[in-house]
Amino acid sequence: MRRLISFLPMLLVCELLFSQAKTLQANKVSHPPIIDGSLDDLAWQQVEPATGFIQNFPNYGSPASQKTEVRIVYDNAAIYIGAHMYDDPALIRKQITARDEEQMKDLDYFSVFFDTYNDDQNGFQFLVTSSNVQTDARLAPNLALMPGEYGDKTWDAVWESQVTITPDGWIVEMKIPYLSLRFAKKDIQTWGLQLLRSVRRNNEVSFWNPVNPNVNGFVNQFGELANLKEIRPPLRLNFSPYVSTGIRSTPENGEYKTTWLRSGGLDVKYGINESFTLDATLIPDFGQVVSDNLVNNLTPYEVKFDEYRPFFTEGTEIFNKGGLFYSRRIGAVPSGFYAADTADNNPNIEVVRNPAKTTLYNGLKFSGRTKKKLGIGVFNAITAPMYATLKDKTTGEKEKFQTELLANYNIIVLDQALRGRSYITFTNTNVIRNGEGRDANVSGLDFSFYDRKNIFNIRGFGHYSQIINPSSSNGYNTSLRAGKVSGRFQYYLQNVILSRYYDPNDLGYLSAANQVISTGAISYNQYTPTNNFLNYTYSLKATYRQLYKPSAFVDFTLEAMGMWTFKNFWVTSVNLSYLPDQHDYFVLGNSFSAYARRPAYGFINIIGNTDNRRKLLFNYNLLLSNFFNTPGKKYHVAEGGIRYRFSNKLTMELSHRHEGETNYIINSGTEPNGQPVIGFANFKDVTSIFSGIYNFTPRINLTVRVRHYWSNVIFNGFANVDNKGYPVMRPFMPGHDENINIFNADAFFTWDFRLGSRLILGYKNALGDDEGLNTALLKNYIDNFTRTFSLDHGHEVTLRFIYFLDYEQLRRKNR
């Protein structure tokens, strides 16, 4: 009892200390330090260091195992960070990686975060590994992040760093120019500040200002960098001209067609003032991006692809905040591409040319935040009209077939940050196409309000869409969610309404409208170690879904989940789900007058991985289901992966996924009278991915990624449905089975030869469309995989040169 009494005051003192934000005084210098990985400069000697780091993981609340000292100074050009990570140099992990790829790698790192507007919501991250590899990210609310990530790492800034291994640890120096930051125009400023250190051998993450995992939010748990005085940054203007050349060889009708590739363009970044930046891209070329993970889509819903094009990934967080921007709409496959392609069905017509991507003329982004914490964003892009060239084989005459209209895409965002992480955001997206083309407009108001203690939250939105030409329609989407967001016990209730004709898909993404979705969830989170676990989470969730109009049941889902991190750093999660009979209206189209009944089922899903500090890492994903009262029907997912780190420079990964279901229901068209037809098929999807990276230096690397995908669909029967969703079998329709192989290989040699400048040599290999979408019904994966290499492949080799030019540096050189 005495021990308990003596422990309580200590606990209260610790809680009080952790609840008070730390403050570091900023020091302005006239002679900034040289970025050479040494802290001998006079500028560092006059500064008191930030110390006293506290663990976030694995032992929250304990002092960091290793001492860290961080000093910060600034001048009118940049802010400078000098950090000394004390340690035994023989124990420092130093794997070399590509930029922005520090997660789950065998390395130590240091990171600094700035909340330049001190709004507890937005910020910048700059990270340096023990091998001097850089990571940078933009922090914003509502980002979908992986564990260990704090911001959007697709954003790349231009800044300097240098690392030195010393007898008592390692040192990093950083110079972050103001061209890579945005902040309010004030004579005296206070920024949010956070410092992070990761010690890989212990899987330890510690922060200068403690970050409590039971508290919702990250930026709101920063300390402060105070007394930043009279920052007078120089003109922020830089240019990134580029040239690109290459050759593409494509198989067509048993022959190879060779195309020479050449392009050039310019990216411009202009800092209008300390707060606002204008980004523009002229005649962009996005050829050197990773190939999409194409699949055979058997669902009634559109496949959503990731974005890899730099202009659409960097600095777009304000445009994504309302969830109304899907950047892949811009420069997508022309809407008339397949109509032109089917002209080949006419024996007298030859498709000479049919571009598969819409050309982007230019793009522009204007964004920033006022000293009143109002974020303003304007995005605009113009795409070219596209044409296919058709040739009459008998006369030799050629004609143009328009596949896409000239189009303008526009987004306007007003985002007001409020006290205590709350915000309210207005977003408008607009698409205008030339002539009689379809125009669209979507407006949305999003909000999120927290109580003063950051324990409870209510958030929601209201979005309204308008479609104009050739026929008009409008619709709305609302959401309201309230719950407890901090503490061990958390819960929420949510309701989402999507009206029947709500359609944001001209510039956004929505898989299906005409739904009402009600959800309730509760979770328990244990973030401090126990006898058996470092942390664990349990949760229950129930979801009820119905049609909006007519009001009708769709499905009900009950889920239970547990996730555990063991003392040996293995991670396992188990998900148990149950769904009674489902009424699938969407598989029958958009009439919503009939549905297909899917049988009740339950499944168990086990996901996990071994200790990611080890050279050899295994991960797995196993899903097994049971369809009640439906003998013979099965669904499963079996996925496994292995990663091996051969050295600090070379890492390889291999993954394999097998998914399959028997008697899966697929939309198979309509009868002449308009009655929908469904098909029952056994399908198998198998995906194998190999990837590897060799890092010659922190600035030079070679990456390779090879993906093979096989989809096999065998139909067992076809049916109409009765008024209760049960199948009414109809005569079998042969010729619908599918056997599809998709193969892609991407290799990129990247050399960052100076700040902001890059040379990229790329190679792509892809199975030709005519070969991939084949009907040779090979029954097993090995036969399909082997046959892939005997078919015609397309090849592409490109060379891209990007050079960064900073106006201020050029001006100083020419003095």
Image: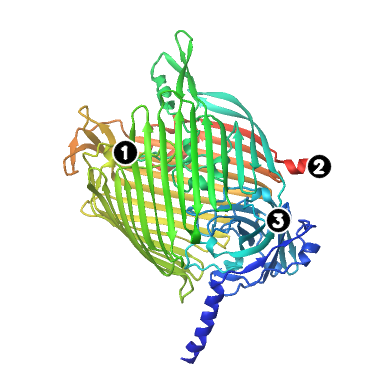
Crowding at label 3, few (<14), some or many (≥20) Cα neighbours within 10 Å? some
Q: Disc 3 residue type?
A: Glu
Crowding at label 2, few (<14), some or many (≥20) Cα neighbours within 10 Å? few
* Label ID, residue 366: none
Q: Name the residue under label 2.
A: 813
Q: Compute the Cα span from label 1 to label 3.
A: 53 Å
Q: Which of marks 1 and 3 is in front?
A: 3
Q: Which residue is drawn at 65% across and 64% down?
A: 226
Q: Which residue is drawn at 42% across and 66% down?
A: 537
Q: Which is more N-terminal, label 2 or label 3?
A: 3
Q: Please, what secondary structure does the residue beneath circle 3 have?
A: loop
User: Closest to the observer: 172 or 169?
Assistant: 172
* Label ID, residue 501: 1
Q: Mark yes or no: residue 779 visible.
A: no
Q: Which of marks 3 and 2 is in front?
A: 3
Q: Residue 194: horizontal and vertical position, in percent? A: 60, 63
Q: Mark yes or no: residue 268 visible.
A: yes
Q: Please, what secondary structure does the residue beneath circle 1 have?
A: loop
User: Closest to the observer: 769 or 315?
Assistant: 315
